[in-house]
């Protein structure tokens, strides 16, 4: 696994920012972010978790770590109405930056304008290759020898926006989508805390 760029956390001297995390599923990347913050030395603390599926295990992971979690159901709302409710929940938590961690919703300008250039996403490919759903399957079907994951600033277009950091993961002979995804997940858990630190220490503009 190759992670780029390397992050010099020792160069940070400011107060940590408050990071709100959005998750729809198991929350393993939320756990990686929260555990990195709890270990100390990161330029962020976890303000809270917003999740949109009642059964999301991410909420359990938040409870285990003493992190505030709030359910914001997307059902019965337009995308803009839903994002407005998400923004309200994030602001109530005091979030200053936002990290999508397995967030299965497409962001609208309602969310992106509220946290301009401070919404990050993690995607399981080396963008700009293999945007959208089934990125791991797309990589296998294309026969690439190198895959990985990307952290980027979110823009209205799907999986678009300035790239903050990437981690490369080799594709092995006999890989299935499950085996490759598992190794990419391992890389994500290393990359995401570092990339968020990079984005906070060196913000756009």
Image (cartoon, helix red, strand yellow):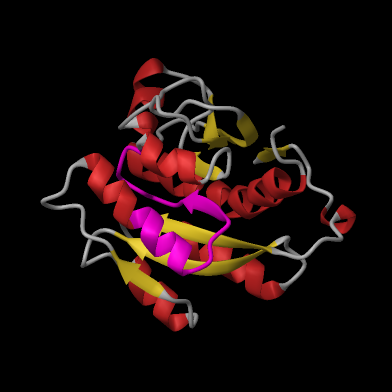
Give the tally of numbered discs.
0
- With 205 as the anchor, is 122 left or right in this view? left
**Measured along the vertical axis of the image, is residue 166 above or below residue 35?**
above
The verdict on residue 104 being magenta is yes
**Residue at the image position 27 percent from the left and 41 percent from the top:** 80
**Residue at the image position 63 percent from the left and 55 percent from the top:** 193
**Residue at the image position 53 percent from the left and 61 percent from the top:** 95
Instruction: Specify the quadrant of the image occupied by residue 204.
Output: top right
Magenta stretch: give its range: 86-107
**Residue at the image position 35 percent from the left and 28 percent from the top:** 132
**Residue 195 image position (x, y, % from top left):** 65, 46
Of the 4 image quadrants, the one containing the N terminus is top right
The verdict on residue 75 being magenta is no
Q: Is residue 72 visible?
A: yes
Residue nearest the viewer, comparing 130 with 117 = 117
- With 46 as the anchor, is 144 left or right in this view? left
Residue nearest the viewer, comparing 127 with 18 = 18
Instruction: Specify the quadrant of the image occupied by residue 157.
Output: top left
Q: Is residue 28 visible?
A: no
Residue nearest the viewer, comparing 175 with 78 = 78
């Amino acid at each position: 696994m190759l992670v780029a760029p390397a992050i010099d956390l020792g160069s940070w001297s400011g107060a940590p920012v408050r990071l709100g995390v959005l998750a729809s599923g198991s929350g393993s990347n939320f756990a990686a972010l929260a555990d990195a913050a709890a270990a100390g030395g990161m330029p962020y603390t976890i303000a809270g978790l917003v999740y949109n599926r009642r059964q999301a295990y991410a909420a359990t992971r938040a409870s285990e770590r003493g992190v505030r979690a709030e359910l914001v159901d997307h059902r019965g709302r337009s995308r803009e109405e839903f994002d407005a409710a998400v923004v309200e929940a994030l602001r109530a938590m005091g979030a200053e930056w936002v990290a999508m961690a397995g967030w299965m919703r497409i962001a609208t300008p309602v969310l992106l304008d509220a946290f301009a250039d401070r919404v990050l996403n993690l995607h399981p490919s080396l963008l700009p290759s293999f945007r959208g759903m089934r990125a791991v399957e797309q990589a296998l079907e294309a026969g690439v020898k190198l895959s990985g994951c990307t952290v980027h600033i979110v823009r209205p277009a799907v999986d678009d926006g300035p790239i903050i950091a990437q981690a490369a993961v080799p594709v092995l002979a006999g890989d299935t989508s499950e085996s490759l995804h598992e190794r990419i997940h391992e890389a994500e858990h290393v990359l995401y805390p570092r990339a968020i630190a990079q984005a906070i220490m060196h913000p756009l503009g």
